[in-house]
Amino acid sequence: MAIFHFSAKVIGRSSGRSAVAAAAYRAGERLHDERIDRDHDFTSKAGVLHSEVMLPKGAPEAFVDRATLWNAVEAAEKRKDAQLAREVEFALPRELSRKDNIKLAREFVKAEFVERGMIADLNVHWDIGEDGKAKPHAHVMLTMREGTKDGFGAKVRDWNKTALIEQWRERWADHVNRALAERDIDARIDHRSLEAQGIALEPQDKIGPAASRIGGRGLEAERIEEHRAIAQRNGERIIANPALALDAITHQQATFTRRDLAAFVHRHSDGKEQFDAAYNAVRASPELIALGKDGRGQDRFTSRAMIETEQRLHRAADTMAQRTEQGVNDVQRNAAFVNAAKRGLVLSGEQKAAFEHVTNSKGLAVVVGYAGTGKSAMLGVAREAWECAGYNVRGAALCRSV
C-alpha cells in the first residue's frame, strides 16, 4: 500500500554534524572531510539503489563530484552554528519498479529543487523492512547557497519558507498519484494531515529500523517511546471503532488484501496482543466487505462505505448517460493533437478512436482497456481539447481490481 512520507530538516554544525559525513552515509561511499582531515567510510552500507549530484545552470561542473561539493559547502560556512544543508526525505511507492521509482525521484528533484537553483545530491534507497517488504525512499541533500561560477554566493532565504515545504509536499503527492494513475494502479497518497482527511487517528512519526534498535537513552529513545504511545492510542481507537481503519485504508486504495490490512494495523498498534485485537476487530466488522480473489489469487476486501460510494456513482452515471452535452469541435480536437505532438505524444489508432468517443456530445462516455494501453495519455489529450472548448476539467479515480 502506497504510503505518504515527506519531511525536511536542516543539517547543522551546531549539533556536531558534517555535510561530508552525511553525504557519505546516504551515498554509501568513502569521502574525505577536509575540514577535520578525516575519512567517512560507509562503503559497507547496503540498499543504495541510485546516487547522483544534480546541478542547476551556472553551478561549477566540479560540484558533480560529491566530495568536492560538500567540502566546498563546509569551507563556505565559517560559523560554529552554521546551517550546512537541507535534507528532504520522501517515501517512494513500492507499487512501482525500481527503475520507475528512480525516474519518479529524479523528475521531482529536477523540477522542484534544481530548477530553483539548488544543487541536489539524490540518493534512492531500497531497504527491506523486518516484515520482508521493500521500503523504498529517497534522501535529497540540498545546498542552501546559490551556486555561482566561482562556487557559492549568498544564502537564499526564500528556500527556508514553510509555505515552500508545504508546496513540495503537495506536489510530491500529485507527482506520485499521476504516476500511479498512468499505470492503472489502484493506490493513492495524500499529503494532508489525518485530521484534514477526516481520519480520526493520531499521526505517527517515522521511526527507521536503525532508530528502533537503539538502546533506551537520549532523544531517539524518547521519540521511540512517544511513537509507541501514539500507536497504542491508535490501536485502542481501532479496536473500539474498526471502521476507522477501513476509512483510512480505502482513502488510499479502493480495495486491499489481508496483507495490506495487517500492515496498516501493525503500523497503528503496539505489541502483538494489541495487534491481534485490532486486526480481529476489523476482520469481524460488518463494514468489511469481501470481494473474492483477484488475478493473483489473493483475497481482496473493501468497505461498505466504498461500495455505497460506487453505487452512488453508478446512479449518477445512469443519469448522465441520458443527457446530451456540448461536444468538442474539430478545431479544438486538432489543437489538442498538435500540442500533444509537441510533447512527443502521438496517439495510436485505437487511442484516436477512444479520443473521438469521449469528446463527442454525449453526457457520458466509457472507455475500457487493459493496464498500460495508454488510456491516461489519451485522456490527457482529451483534457486539453475540453479546456480549449472552455470547460473546467476535474479528474477522479475510483477503481476495483477483482
Image (cartoon, grey):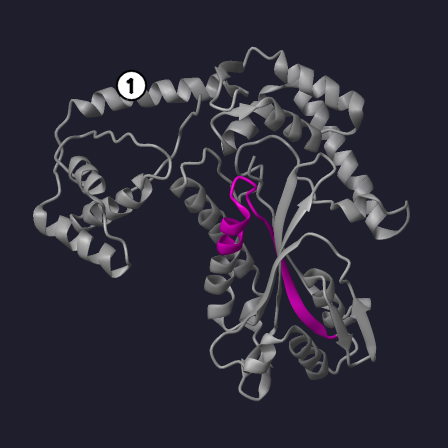
Q: Quadrant of residue 213?
A: top right
Q: Quadrant of residue 199?
A: top right
Q: Residue at x 27, y 42 (%)?
A: 379
Residue 268 position in % (x across, y down): 69, 31
* Residue 112 drawn above or below residue 179: below
In the image, the segment drawn in magenta is 82-104
Position of 331 with respect to 118 (left or right) is: left
* Residue 236 drawn above or below residue 96: above
* Residue 84 drawn above or below residue 111: below
Residue 358 position in % (x across, y down): 19, 36
Position of 334 with respect to 84 (left or right) is: left
**Residue that sits furthest to the bottom in the current view:** 150
State yes or no: residue 90 in magenta.
yes
State yes or no: residue 182 in magenta.
no
Residue wearing tag 1: 315
Callout 1 crowding tier (Cα within 10 Å): few <14, some 14–19, many ≥20: few
- Image quarter where the C terminus lies is top left
Residue 144 position in % (x across, y down): 61, 73
Position of 399 with respect to 152 (left or right) is: left
